[in-house]
């Protein structure tokens, strides 16, 4: 980590795609990590440099000493947006899995006051809704729809910490490019078979960041003085047809099998609206804070992805 004063980090959601890579990156640099784990899982991760700490956000339970002598809390917890169809029941899961843990951490940090660790909190570009070609810096107003409502409430759950003087960073994450999972992890195998293509009319802007740079950005923000919303995206948003074509070219495969919007909605349900939405993020805060992307342009990212995308370095 760039700031040597950040030596101990608490991570919630460390078992997820981003959280696991973040923990690996931190431990590799000798940063001490406390991994918040739910009941029954506390003994699963006892690697050197990682201490499992029990918590149960559904019951409002956090180990009393969980945040003692900690520099930064990184909360990446929450049920996967694209893992299931958005039934009424699963929408409730998406909300509760985010609000319960975030609220618990925010209240505990607020209790500790201005000297408390900073909170680096997961959020999402879904807060902006479907905005066409409109550039969206962090100051852009929120959008409409289920995801915009969810993310707005999710960010508001950090208010107790912010109101108590704690530094709170809101990670408005864009499409995370990695072959290891997420939306792209499902698209790449199809492209390798020559079965992929643009989604919908292909004109929606997809703001993106590689997993490698996402982890680097979290660590940069953990060590900086930034607070408030931060767009985790590159300065190179592209239309979804362009991204798919670039991947297909690198794989020496065609990308002509367009997936029509009705078919996508049939397959994905409510999540299709998020996939088809256009969000042209402007990462103004990261740029102003001096962050430098290793994969700032689509060609850089595609080369990394096709090569395996495995090395996540600090």
Image (cartoon, rainbow, N blue to C red):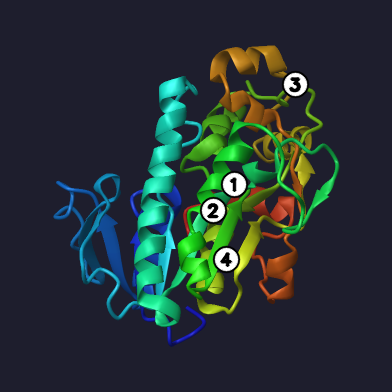
Question: Of circles 3 and 4, which is in front?
Answer: 4
Label 2 belongs to which residue?
156
Contact (CB < 8 A) between labels 2 and 1? yes
Say which residue label 1 marks.
Answer: 152
Total marks in image: 4
CA gap between label 1 and label 3 equals 37 Å
Q: Tag 1: Cα neighbours inside 10 Å, few (<14), some, or many (≥20)?
A: some
Cα–Cα gap, marks 2 and 3: 42 Å
Q: Quadrant of residue 83?
A: top left
Q: CA distance from mark 4 to mark 2?
A: 22 Å
Residues at badges 4 and 1 in contact (C-beta under 8 Å)?
no
Secondary structure of the residue carrying tag 3 is: loop
- Which circle's residue, 1 or 3, is located before the other in the chain? 1
Q: Do residues under tags 2 and 3 come within 8 Å of each other at their CB atoms?
A: no
Q: Secondary structure at mark 1?
A: helix
Secondary element type, mark 2 = helix
Nearest-to-viewer mark from 1 and 3: 1
Residue 242 showing in the rendered view: yes
Mark 4 secondary-structure assignment: helix
Residues at marks 4 and 1, CA–CA distance in whole angstroms: 22 Å
Q: Looking at the picture, does residue 81 appear above or below residue 166?
A: above
Could one spot residue 177 in this view of the protein? no
Which badge, 2 or 3, is on the more N-terminal residue? Answer: 2
The residue that label 3 is drawn on is 256
Pointer 3 or 4: first along the chain? 4
- Name the residue located 33 percent from the left edge and 50 percent from the top edge: 15
Report which quarter residue 264 is drawn in.
top right
Q: Nearer the viewer, residue 248 or 3?
A: 3
**Which dot, 2 or 3, sits closer to the camera?**
2
């Amino acid at each position: 980590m760039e700031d040597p004063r950040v030596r101990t980090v608490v991570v919630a959601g460390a078992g997820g795609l981003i959280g696991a890579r973040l923990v690996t990156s931190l431990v590799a640099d000798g940063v001490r990590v406390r991994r918040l784990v739910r009941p029954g899982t506390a003994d699963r991760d006892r690697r050197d440099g990682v201490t499992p700490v029990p918590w149960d956000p559904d019951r409002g339970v956090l180990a009393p000493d969980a945040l003692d002598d900690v520099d930064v809390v990184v909360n990446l917890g929450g049920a996967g947006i694209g893992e299931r169809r958005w039934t009424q029941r699963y929408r409730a899961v998406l909300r509760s899995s985010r609000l319960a843990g975030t609220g618990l951490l925010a209240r505990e940090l607020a209790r500790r006051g201005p000297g408390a660790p900073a909170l680096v909190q997961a959020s999402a570009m879904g807060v902006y809704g479907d905005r066409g070609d409109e550039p969206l810096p962090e100051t852009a107003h929120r959008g409409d729809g289920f995801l915009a409502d969810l993310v707005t409430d999710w960010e508001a759950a950090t208010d107790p910490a912010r109101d108590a003087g704690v530094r709170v960073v809101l990670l408005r994450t864009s499409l995370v490019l990695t072959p290891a999972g997420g939306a792209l992890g499902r698209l790449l195998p199809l492209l390798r078979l020559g079965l992929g293509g643009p989604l919908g009319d292909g004109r929606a802007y997809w703001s993106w960041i590689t997993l490698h740079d996402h982890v680097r950005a979290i660590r940069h923000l953990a060590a900086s003085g930034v607070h408030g919303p931060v767009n985790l995206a590159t300065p190179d948003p592209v239309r979804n047809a362009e991204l798919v074509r670039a991947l297909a070219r690198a794989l020496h495969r065609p990308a002509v099998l367009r997936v029509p919007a009705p078919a996508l909605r049939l397959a994905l349900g409510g999540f299709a609206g998020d996939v088809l939405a256009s969000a042209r993020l402007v990462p103004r805060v990261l740029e102003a804070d001096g962050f430098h992307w290793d994969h700032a342009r689509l060609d850089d990212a595609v080369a990394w992805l096709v090569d395996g995308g495995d090395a996540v370095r600090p």
